[in-house]
């Protein structure tokens, strides 16, 4: 025992590093529940990925509905502008029949 006390100053850094290592291992394994917490977090990430994919599919469906709506609205707008205001396209002849 006296040998350790005499040579403690020689091995101070080694003892300090061993204490730090033991503290880190205890922190990771016992307090943070290290390997199992990764599985839980991965499950949460997988759930979020699935949720994001569902939202992306819903966004695509809504985008297609909006595009279809705007396409029909554009046709309606064009027909109304032709009928009400007599607008014509370039190089087009427009005949109006009055009844």
Image: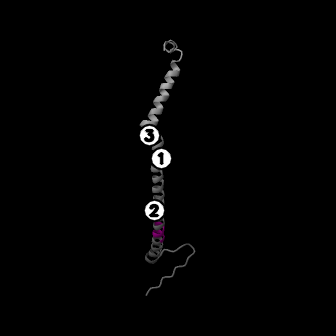
Distance between mark 3 and mark 1 Cα atoms: 11 Å
Q: Position of residue 86 (x, y in %)?
A: 47, 76
Q: Position of residue 63 (x, y in %)?
A: 47, 64
Chief SS of the magenta region: helix
Q: Residue at x 47, y 85 (%)?
A: 97
Element marked by disc 2? helix
Distance between mark 3 and mark 2 Cα atoms: 37 Å
Report the magenta residues as a range.
Answer: 66-71
Q: Nearer the viewer, mark 3 or mark 2?
A: 3
Q: Which residue is mark 3?
A: 33
From what the image shows, is residue 67 above or below residue 33? below
What's the mark number on residue 58?
A: 2
Label count reads 3
What's the mark number on residue 19?
A: none
Q: Which residue is mark 1?
A: 39
Q: Residue at x 48, y 44 (%)?
A: 38
């Amino acid at each position: 025992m006296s040998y350790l006390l005499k040579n403690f100053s020689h091995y101070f850094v080694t003892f300090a590093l061993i204490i730090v290592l033991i503290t880190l291992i205890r922190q990771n394994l016992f307090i943070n529940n290290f390997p199992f917490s990764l599985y839980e977090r991965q499950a949460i990430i997988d759930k979020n990925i699935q949720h994001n994919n569902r939202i992306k599919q819903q966004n695509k469906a809504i985008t297609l509905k909006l595009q279809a709506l705007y396409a029909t609205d554009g046709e309606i707008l064009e027909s109304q502008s032709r009928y009400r205001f007599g607008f014509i396209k370039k190089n087009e002849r427009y005949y109006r029949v009055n009844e």
